[in-house]
Image: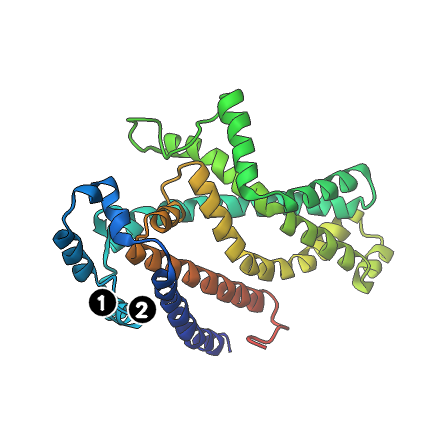
Amino acid sequence: MIGRMVVRRIMFAVPILGVVSFAIFLLGKASPFDPVAAYFGVRILRASPEQLAQIRADWGVDDPAWVQYGRWLRNVMTGDLGDSRLFNQPVSTVVGERIGWSVLLVAVGLTVALVVAVLAGTVAAWWRGGWFDRTVTALAYALEAAPVFWLALAALSLFAVFLQWLPAGGLTDPRAEPSIGQVAEHLLLPGMVLGIAQAPWFLLFVRQSLLRELSQDYVLGARSRGLRERAVVLRHALRTGLLPLITLVGARVPELITGALLVETVFSWPGVASATVAAALSVDFPLLAALTLLGTVAVLAGNLLADVLYTVADPRVRADG
């Protein structure tokens, strides 16, 4: 049953990836930015019209969008993602060097968000209406409305500039070799910011889900049998209440990717998200198309993984409807 669901989702993903990738070329054709001018910069003033015309012909920037897309798709089918004009490297090399750091940042951020949400949401629901519940709920709603880049800039100003407890950005200190200690120190601030930015949705969900479970008959029955409140909450209500959280994690993947993009930009973290911003600003369409496609794959894979895990965790759920 799960296997059939995975196959159906993969078949459904193929046209989605086709539409998304083609949309990049349509947007590129409609964009007022000229990739040749972006590549040359101020050097374009010294370039001859013949040189510019030759580069435009070599790159095919004046071809219709469907011609550019067809050429790109044929190359992708052979494993060639093209060359990045911004980094002067093959796109596969740029992505390969950066994707690991993005995965690390997202994993740390998601872990922080889930730990904070489960702990704070459980305590808030356990003592509903108390000072902790009111404080955490109000703070969650406030953080929910706060832009990720604002949180990143605020944390950067406080912990890196004012208190000088943590480095301001990058993967390591200047001229330092990457090491576990260096990477961990530089990862702490962006990872915490990304996690705190994502925590409110999970926290409010855990709180509401646990409150709903605490009013169910099986919980009332457990209390009537004389079980301790801690056992009732942690062994019965919380175990069932956390099951829907798996689906929410999958649904939050797009927001997590967007948050990582902003956090990587603010903290100069060398991941694929910051490369996406640089590619867009530099009109580097080969790199931008590959990274956009990669982001779409991550969203689809996240939702599929969440559905599979939920089906495995709760056999009562029928896979794919």
Q: Position of residue 80 (x, y in %)?
A: 22, 62
Considering the numbered disc 1 on the image, is that residue within a helix, a strand or a loop? Answer: helix
Residue 75, label in figure: 1
Discs 2/1, front: 2
Name the side, left or right, on which 215 lies relative to 150. Answer: right
Q: From where the camera sits, is residue 184 visible?
A: yes
Task: Give, as a three-letter code, the residue at label 2.
Answer: Ala
Q: From where the camera sits, is residue 165 visible?
A: no
Q: Is residue 271 above or below residue 60?
A: above
Q: Residue at x 75, y 51 (%)?
A: 233
Image quadrant for the C terminus?
bottom right
Q: Position of residue 79 (x, y in %)?
A: 23, 64
Q: Residue at x 26, y 49 (%)?
A: 37
Q: Is residue 3 above or below residue 275?
A: below
Name the side, left or right, on which 117 lies relative to 40. Answer: right
Q: Residue at x 24, y 69 (%)?
A: 71
Q: Nearer the viewer, residue 59 or 93?
A: 59
Task: Give, as a three-letter code, the residue at label 1.
Answer: Asn
Task: Classify 10 Å Cα crowding around label 2: few (below 14), some (14-19), many (20 and above).
Answer: many
Q: Residue at x 41, y 75 (%)?
A: 15
Picture mark count: 2
Name the residue tied to disc 2. Answer: 65
Task: Classify 10 Å Cα crowding around label 1: few (below 14), some (14-19), many (20 and above).
Answer: few
Q: Position of residue 307 (x, y in %)?
A: 54, 67
Q: Nearer the viewer, residue 70 or 244?
A: 70
Q: What separation in Å lies between label 2 and label 1 (alpha carbons)?
A: 15 Å
